[in-house]
Image (cartoon, helix red, strand yellow):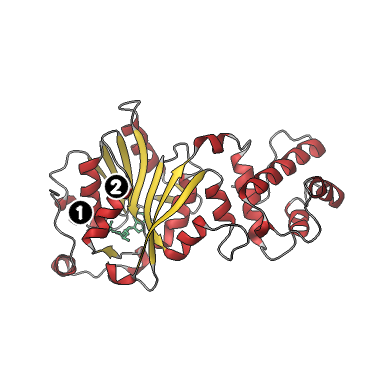
Amino acid sequence: MTKVNRQTVSYLSRRFEEVGLNPNKRHGQNFLIDLNLLHLLARSAELNKNDVVLEIGTGMGSLTGLFAEAAAQVVTVEIDHHLHQMAAEELESFDNIEMLKQDALKNKNQFASEVIEAVQRHLAVDPDRVFKLAANLPYNVATPIISNLLRSEIIPATMTVTIQKELGERLVAKPGTKDYSALSIWVQSICDTKIVRIMSPKVFWPRPKVDSAIIHIVHRPERRAAIADLDFFYAFVRSMFFHRRKFMRSVAVSAFKNQLSKPDVDDVLNRLGHGADARSEQLDVESMQTLSEAFRQKVIEVTGVERPVLANQS
Ligand code: SAM
């Protein structure tokens, strides 16, 4: 039986009224009020007593409590100090929750080091501990949270999160579809992705304008190990989709303008059988990886630089 109050509309509105506040739109404060879905999210995270769970967006702590009951340790991060305070009261009977009151992101491209360090500290307790992300994410920062975690020193074994449906569709999109994007390739190149449930706005309080989805992402370390230079690949994919409707050749000529001549670019594309009319959105994940590696090798060959860096690489 959960030790946390049931997160219903009447409970939430009463708590907000008590502190004289309204949910903050800017911070994506849309609380999940369907108790079945709260449990579905927690169940889909497949937590067990070896797991260290990172939750971004403690809110009022209702998911946090469910995670803490199933896992070894929870690290939960909340940017809003009123919510942090209210959740601390809710969760005081737990001894396996570390609550951080801060922005989970240092900037768009980086996680806050305090968050990564807290997770690392709890992982270090036992070599069998496994890192997982589980959260009802604030939608305005869902993409940087997912993509930055996949580039961090510690990659979660699984990510089970509520995000905008549109973003969920991009994460599972296949080549040639309208949702297929740099993010689809980046995430699918190192993970399996699946949509667990589509949810209407009415399961949140206050209601967001868009549909949402619970997604489950499973990290595949063997795929990651097969990518020679992850930072280069990340930057390459983003460059190739910057002008997604343009022909790949002109996008590549511009991305490598400081490193490769047009004949160099043509050489790589011809060798891999990509004609003049090829577009990035037609390439599957594997072909994009092969192409990225071929360009990386070409830059090494032409410039002699051991670790090539693209202009947009951070
Ligand atoms: N976990 C609660 C639930 O499921 O009902 C609340 C989820 S609500 C969608 C997102 C929460 O993330 C809000 O409490 C918001 O204040 C917090 N938040 C927004 N941006 C954040 C950030 N950059 N770092 C940490 N927390 C953030």
**Residue drawn at the location 39% of the way across and 61% of the way down:** 213
* Residue that badge 1 annotates: 87
Secondary structure found at label 1: helix
**Residue drawn at the location 80% of the way across and 38% of the way down:** 303
Q: Residues within 10 Å of mark 2 (few under 14, many from 20)?
A: many
Q: Give the left or right position of residue 253, taking residue 100 as reference.
A: right
In primary-sequence order, the first of circles 1 and 2 is 2
* Residue that badge 2 annotates: 76
The Cα–Cα distance between marks 1 and 2, rounded to whole angstroms, is 10 Å
**Residue 176 lies in quadrant:** bottom right
Type of the residue with mark 1:
Ala
Q: Give the left or right position of residue 7, taking residue 221 as reference.
A: left
Type of the residue with mark 2:
Thr
- Name above or below for residue 227 compared with residue 214: above
Who is closer to the viewer here, 222 or 240?
Answer: 222
**Residue drawn at the location 74% of the way across and 38% of the way down:** 297
Q: Position of residue 294 (x, y in %)?
A: 74, 41
Q: Quadrant of ligand 1?
A: bottom left
User: Hey, which residue is sitting farthest top in the picture?
Assistant: 127
The label number, if any, that marks residue 79 in the structure image: none
Count of labels in the image: 2
Secondary structure found at label 2: strand
Who is closer to the viewer here, 198 or 236?
Answer: 198
Q: Are marks 1 and 2 in contact (CB under 8 Å)?
A: yes
Mark 1 C-beta closer than 8 Å to ligand 1 = no
**Residue drawn at the location 22% of the way across and 57% of the way down:** 60
Q: Position of residue 279 (x, y in %)?
A: 71, 60
